[in-house]
Image: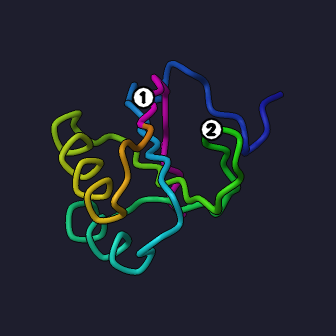
Amino acid sequence: MASDNYYPIKNMTPSNVYRIYTEKKNKRAILDLVGQEFESFTVQATSGYYRGHSEKSIVIEIVGASARAIKRIAEQIRKMNGQKSVLVLKLNARSQVKRG
């Protein structure tokens, strides 16, 4: 018997999940920038390592965005933080929003 928390994969929509990893600098400006482009996203505080040194970082996760929009936002974040690079991951996923 299926529970209320079970979602058969056939009922889920294929979508891309993008994660942008960046140094935790200019967080408010970054969130404002991302919020202008996307109506919903997730931000997670984390610790990252770059060339053997720990740094406070954030991960911005966006579901269902276009690759073009992600590339544009990632480049703006990179410039804003004065970084040589930011990491962008693209994950293939299936999603379903349960509304009540």
Q: Where is residue 40 in the image (x, y as percent from the top left)?
A: 38, 62
Residue 90 circle label: 1
Q: Which amino acid does label 1 sit on?
A: Lys
The picture quadrant where one finds residue 2 is: top right
In depth, the one of 64 and 82 nearer the eye is 82
| Magenta region includes residue 92 | yes
Residue at screen point 26% across, 43% down: 70
99 relative to 71 in the view: left or right: right
**Which is the main secondary structure of the residues drawn in magenta?**
strand
Q: Which residues make up the magenta segment?
A: 88-100
Precedes in sequence: disc 2 or disc 1: 2
Q: Residue farthest to the top?
A: 10
Residue at screen point 40% across, 48% down: 62
Classify 66 as above or below 57.
above
Q: Residue farthest to the bottom?
A: 28
Residue at screen point 53% across, 66% down: 24
| Mark 2 Cα-neighbour bin, 10 Å: few <14, some 14–19, many ≥20 | few
Residue 39 circle label: none
| Magenta region includes residue 5 | no
In depth, the one of 67 and 30 nearer the eye is 30
Which element type, helix, strand or loop, lies under badge 2?
loop
Residue at screen point 64% across, 62% down: 56
Q: Position of residue 87 (x, y in %)?
A: 44, 38
Q: Where is residue 16 in the image (x, y as percent from the top left)?
A: 38, 31
Query: Mark 2 — residue?
Result: 51
